Every structure is written in structure tokens, then in C-alpha cells.
Image: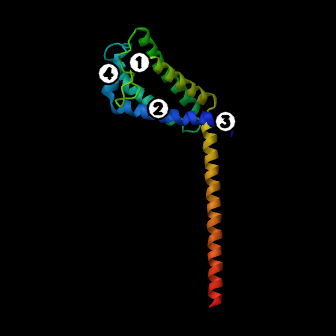
Amino acid sequence: MDLSTAGAAGCAIALSWLMLAAGAAKLRHRSEHARAVEAYALLPAGVGRRVAPLLGARECTAGAAVWLEGMQARAALLMLVLLALYTGAVAINLARGRRDIDCGCAGTAAQVPLGGAVLVRNAALILAALAVYARPAALALVLDAWRSSLAALAVATLLVLLYNGANFLLSRDALLQDD
């Protein structure tokens, strides 16, 4: 396995965890997330309450779909769309001079104010999602390699146990013959 495959697989695993954790937090704390969406002032008043759970559900969908065979590219594309949407919303509010609102990305676990660092962080996440999109089979290759390694370890363990068992039986027979 080459380094780019391992890197894309690592990005897929990290983005999966991030999307599942963030999406679950948004679904668990719907009213807080709805307030965060409303605070961006990009949608008509009251729409954030209906959009917030959809965003959380889409994040969970993207995070889970990365693990399904043949769905990695679609999952990465959904991640890209969500990350671009979030980054655009942050950029618009920063251009408006609105740095005092919570980005809404961490649920209620942390208050992350808007700023250039959020844009840089999101750009890094977008690059990670692009890596997954560019190499959608990377995670499957790593999992196959992992399964192969696990299978090899299981076979090796079985052989060592058989060897030790045979040695025990042989030594037992030798002990029994000495009596």
C-alpha cells in the first residue's frame, strides 16, 4: 500500500469520526444548533429550526456512508458540500464583521467564535475530503490489508497453538512412557 492510499484512508476515518460526532451533537442539541444556524442570519427567521436537524442528519449520513462499499466517493462529495456550505457561511459573516457568534460546529461542547482560524481549519477539512474523493477506494484497500493482516495473525496464532499443543502431547507421552 502506498502513502497516498494510507493518507486518503486516514482522512476518510478522521472525517467519518468528525462528521458522526458533530452530526450526533447537532441532533442531540437541536435547539442550541438551531440558534447557532439562526445567528448566522443567512436564512429567513425561523428556518434555522427546520434546517439544523437536516444538517446534523446529513453529517451523520456522510460519516457512516464512508464505511459502505462503493459509497466513499458520494460520502466525500456530501462532506465537501457541507464543508463548503459551512465555510461560505463563516466567510460571509466574517466579511460582515460578525466575529461574536459561535460557529455551531462543536455542538454545545465548545463555543468556537468565528475567525480566520475557523476558515483555515475548514480549508484543511476540505482538502481531506478532496483526498477521500480522489481516492474513494483507499479505505477499502486499507481495511482489506487490515483484514489480511488480521487473518495472517489468526493463522499464525493457530499454528503456534497447534505447535504448543503438539509439544505438550509429545512431552506428556514421553512422561507417561518414563513411568
Q: Secondary structure at mark 2?
A: helix
**Do tag 2 and tag 1 residues touch (Cβ < 8 Å)?**
no
Q: Earlier in the sequence, mark 3 or mark 1?
A: 3
Q: Earlier in the sequence, mark 3 or mark 2?
A: 3
Give how far apart the Cα atoms at labels 2 and 1 are.
Answer: 19 Å
**Amino acid type for the residue under numbered disc 3:** Leu
Within-10-Å neighbours for mark 3: few <14, some 14–19, many 20+: few
Is 15 drawn above or below residue 35 in the view shown?
below
**Amino acid type for the residue under numbered disc 2:** Met
Residue position marked by numbered label 2 in the rendering: 19
Give how far apart the Cα atoms at labels 2 and 4 are.
Answer: 20 Å
**Amino acid type for the residue under numbered disc 4:** Arg
User: Looking at the rendered structure, which numbered label has been put on residue 114?
Assistant: 1
x 67%, y 36%: residue: 3
x 53%, y 26%: residue: 125
Which image quadrant for residue 124? top right
Q: Earlier in the sequence, mark 2 or mark 4?
A: 2
**Amino acid type for the residue under numbered disc 1:** Leu
